[in-house]
Amino acid sequence: MSSFYLTTPIYYASGEPHIGHAYTTILADVLARYRRRAGDDVLFLTGTDEHGQKIQEAAAEQGLSPLELCDLMAGRFEAVWETLGISHDRFIRTTEAEHVAVVRAMLERLRDNGFIYESEYTGWYSVGQERYFTEKEIGPERVDPIAGGPVERIREKNYFFRMSAFQERLIRHIEENPEWIVPRSRRNEVLGFLGRPLEDLSISRPRSRIHWGIPLPWDGDHVTYVWVDALINYVTASGAIDPAAPPGERGFGDPPRPSRWPADVHLMGKDIITTHAVYWPTLLMGADLPLPRRILAHGWWVVGETKMSKSIGNVVDPLALRELFGTDAVRWYLMREMPTGQDASYTPERFLARYDELRNIFGNLAHRTLSMVKRYRAATVPEGPADGLARETADAVAAYRRGIDGYRLHEGFAAAMDLARAANGFVEVQEPWAQARRPDGAADLDRTLATLVRTLGVLTCLFEPVMPEKSRELARRLGLAGVPRFGELESLEVGGLEVAVDAPLFPPADFPAA
Ligand code: ME8
């Protein structure tokens, strides 16, 4: 059994979960479920980012202490993930004692290695992004280049990480590992960024300005810059570092001691590619830890032309969609509609089109198959050879796995839906209703029905990562003991199963009239 460790960003505890967060988290969930179904030992990590100026200010606005706000919001994220069927193994919060200790151990390691120094910082800071920007980046309007929010001029003593020392090594790593950052457009963007001299990274904030952070181990008047704090969560949850051990024995080193580190893939939106593909790997190099195996930056959900974002106020609430169409339909839409890596525009029309696809192709295939087994064979699947659609099934499974393994999930799920489409075509060609009428049609009808049930069994496996509820429900109606794993598909036997016909898997649904 191989092991697989994947992560989502940890979301700011200052904002409500919206479709953008849901997209990344469902993407991770699909990959986690797929890997488990393929037999891997999975660690799926998500959580909340709870320190920094943004949280401090949001809490103050609401008359709460920062921790009260974080408790509230972490609970909100967890509740939303539960309703959306997210199967994470660990929900990390950066205010946890274990994480705080690992951050401090990591900073001490960087300092012991000679990569931390003290200096004065002058520049522009965006609280919205919790980041410094250069004069050039903020442009003549002096706004943060990501969301267009305000920036403030800052001059203060900071501790710096000698990020510049790792520029060459990082460029070499990216060039030697063409798949390390996917998709390619993001890799080119990072290489472009690294084409200019890399500056050192300010890793602290004076406590006089921001008190809500992790104090530096060697200077309690400064707290850790929230991005450094946040990125380290991936190492905390891996169990690689034992902060309670004496400095030389905490687990730093490449290779690390046995743990889940390095991560197999960090998932995120393209807004935070620089922090993940530049800050994070150089911090790891500085602390003698190996780099994550892959960084995947997906596109943005936009409304019209504009990125969905809390500060802009154009966010779509995944729970409202769930109320109308069910969890699995929301998951299906998000995974099927966005070509992994590109931007996608949310519209109710496209949502409905994707729902209709579920209803008319997959739902319809399930319903007609189960009804015919009931009508013609008293709800018992015949023993007839289930060998129709053999080539279509093998091709679909192969295309599906190529798509998901290559992080082109939309292609994988399109291949699964094409198999359902082919099975509907098979019904039209075989005409089981005519086979049932023909005096010598019994054997043909047995083969048609067994083939259709077998195909549906395969589809429960292919669809389970994206539609866990409906797939489990269909497996139950088919009379299967559960959703089959990939290793069980070849030998899947359906003869003799007792099927159940029930209400449509995807009932009629629509948006309320405006
Ligand atoms: O950046 N479309 O947290 P955050 C697609 N705490 N994905 C979107 C999206 C959109 N319109 N809006 C948000 C942070 N996302 C830091 C991360 S990690 C060590 C620290 C998703 O709450 C996407 O994954 O602003 C994006 O990268 C993330 O939410 C940003 O979440």
Image (cartoon, rainbow, N blue to C red):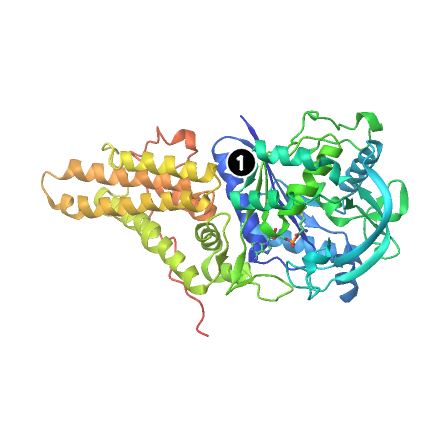
Residue 326 in the image: x percent, y percent? 47, 56
Q: Residue at the location (40% across, 56% down)?
A: 354
Residue 508 in the image: x percent, y percent? 37, 61
Residue 358 in the image: x percent, y percent? 37, 53
Badge 1 crowding class, 10 Å Cα cut-off, few under 14, some 14 to 19, many 20 or more, is some
- Outermost residue on the left side: it is 439
Residue 236 in the image: x percent, y percent? 72, 37
Task: Give the left or right position of residue 240, taking residue 380 as reference.
Answer: right
Residue 61: image quadrant is bottom right
Residue 402: image quadrant is top left
Q: Secondary structure at mark 1?
A: loop
Task: Give the left or right position of residue 448, taking residue 10 as reference.
Answer: left
Residue 20 showing in the rendered view: yes
Residue 479 showing in the rendered view: no
Residue 494: image quadrant is top left
- Outermost residue on the front side: it is 196
Q: Amino acid at mark 1?
A: Glu
Q: Residue at the location (78% across, 48% down)?
A: 225
Task: Give the left or right position of residue 442, taking residue 123 as reference.
Answer: left
Task: Give the left or right position of residue 299, taking residue 74 as reference.
Answer: left
Residue for badge 1: 179
- Decide which of 337, 442 is in the foreground and name it: 337
